[in-house]
Amino acid sequence: MKHDTKKLTKLYWELWDLPNGAFWGTPFFRLIPTKLIIYNWFYTKKERKFNRWMRRNFGEEPVTIEDVDPDLKLRKAINIYENHGHFGTTGSYQLNYNKKKNKAYIHYYLEIPPAYTYHDIEYVADSLQKSIEKPFLNFQQQAYLHTGEEFDLDSIKLEKKQMWNYFQDLGYYYFDEEFVEVEADTTLGNKEIDIRVQIDQGVSDAKISRTKINDFQIEIDSITQGNMDDKFYRWQSGKIRKDLLDTLVHVSPGEYYSLKQTNQSIQNLSQLGIFAAPGINYNEVDGDSSRLNSVLSMRTLNATTIGVNARGNYKNTGYMGPAVGLNLTQLNVFNGAENLTFNLEGYYDFPIGVYRERVSNSSGVTFGAELSAPLIKTPFQFINQTYSLPKQSVSLTANYNNRRDYFEMVSWTAAYGITWKSSPKITHRINLIDVTFSDIGNTTERFDTVVASNPSLRNSLIDQFILGTSYTFQYNNSSTESKLIGTYFEGNIELAGNALGLLNTIFTNDEKGEKRILGIRYSQFARFSYDFRAYLRLGKYNQLAFRNVGGIGLAYGNSEYMPYIRQYFMGGSNSMRPLSTRTLGPGRYIELDQAEVNQVGDMKLEWNLEFRFRIGPRFNGALWTDAGNIWLLKEDPNRPYGEVRWNKIFQDSYLTTGAGIRIDLNILLLRFDYGIILYAPLFIDGYKWVWQNKIPLHGPVIGFGYPF
């Protein structure tokens, strides 16, 4: 089944040229070819700049039979099945026209015999010298070819590639992929093939012998490092600890050459963040092909960079506005590849979306600092350098936010974390310490009225102290350049207050009442969230994107409610478009005259579906729909109907839809959408759908980049 899918996918992309007006990336589902009509409308014999601009950006040249070349397509289709063991495949095609003879249809016909399978796979080492015979025979344990499988030319190519990597890692520097010969015997009958794998007998012994490193030098900014007694490698404007660099570079005199260790060394140096274009060159020692001289060369990046920016600021909470920032980066602060960054930004944001009149403007200042460094000796055995250089970081973020209609909030977060990869597609991050404190002040009468009648909101907002740990798992296989479907998943677990709770239990006898550390009440909770995405390629430029996000927070111990800054909300241009942030939910609860700070919950579920299609070189379109809501896990008399009804999750979810234009400016993608709320569970039965309630719940959505 796996091979059949592979062959059919190749056949699909090889045979099917999309006609003008193709929809969903398929040749058999067509709409009115508007882009072809635009192209013809603005086509003139005498070229004009405006006409050319319209054709390039909004038109599409007609797809003709000459462009398709059915003879070539048929030969390629036959080759696909021949390369997968269906020897003797034949085919033909039929060209049909409509009555006006302005449209043509091609029908391809293939006669495909059963595929040949591998009968016996033999690795022949009779004529090899002893130094390579054993590793050659041992390679069979990781071979791509297996008895009983269908013949596959791609697998044979992978076999040769894998063997090249195998011998390069063992020190055979001169070993070449072309040295590997794979012979196939198809005379057995019964659709079976015998495979014979061997090394070309014409290759000299020197080409298949192991090589050692004779001499190894390091050049930084063209300066050769030579003083072995010095504790640092030096260049004109800086230095780095020798023990650090020697640990990361796995090439040394007297050791056998290894492609794997070479690539690992280059990867480690690249990820330090202080060097550019690291590379290791090998040269044969004169008169001795068994020894290599090697040179590691690299350039240093600017140690200090300062930047000032003024930009349009967009936040996924549904606010946008101008922001002015200053950032400073200092590399290699303590001569151990410790990189320090500072960010200071002042902003003034105004809300966007359907309910923007109800939401106050927001202004404030954000300060952030992060010190990152390579983690050489990891505290956990499962963290290694195989796929990336593990990094440790200490960060501090402070924020002052003025919601002029409600309150002023001050918050800060400090964390120590480790990031590493366990495969090319899997990234882990664990925050061993994650501390957050937030409090509000200078509240308005409007906000005080809300809080006075809602003790749960007061408890979740005032004097929040969070001390915990978190873990994030990320799997990223979202690219669809070489495949039909791409996927992405990110999951996060956060636990807070457990260590403080244990200390309180040990050192105090108070089993009742509110517990405090240094006079501050601390929070205890567990929070779980996930983000799953899938991308289906539909033709060369079109894509169907799906996302499902969810989360749940459970307060316990010293907390009756989840902290406000850890509760879930919805809205904004990346979530439940065109609703503004914190303007829906929880559940069927409706907020009429009070602040939107009420509209947060303990649980979140959201589904998004978006069809993305090409309009022109810099213009793309989208049709989308969003569904979801937030809920409370227990009843709150101040927010009636806000609790989750497990058997009516979908009935209690909002549903929106819309369309939009994306303008690709290379460095930035602008997004303009217009959406409408199709279904709102807050209304009574019979008035939930837009055509029933007659309320104009629609509006524009502006954003930057794709929503997911």
Image (cartoon, helix red, strand yellow):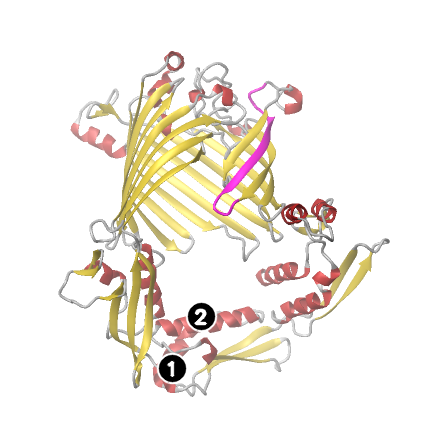
Q: Considering only vertical position in the picture, is 17 above or below 192?
A: above
Please, is residue 384 above or below residue 31 in the view? below
In which quarter of the view is residue 191 placed? bottom right
Using the image, tell me which numbered label, if any, was put on residue 162.
2
Point out residue 386 in the picture as x, y percentages from the top left corner: 34, 59
Q: Nearer the viewer, residue 294 or 42?
A: 42
- Which residue was labeled with disc 1? 208
Q: Residue at x 13, y 65 (%)?
A: 229
Residue drawn at (56%, 76%) of the image: 119
Q: Is residue 274 left or right of residue 586?
A: left
Would residue 480 be visible to someone looking at this image? yes
Farthest residue, direction left:
229
Amino acid carrying mark 1 in the image? Ile
Q: In the visual, does 155 lie left or right of 140?
A: right
Image location of residue 400, percent across then percent down: 32, 27
Q: Is residue 52 above or below residue 482?
A: above
- 139 magenta-colored: no
Instruction: Please state which of residues 491 and 573 is positioned toward the viewer in this rendering.
Output: 573
Magenta residue span: 665-683
Amino acid type at image mark 2: Gln
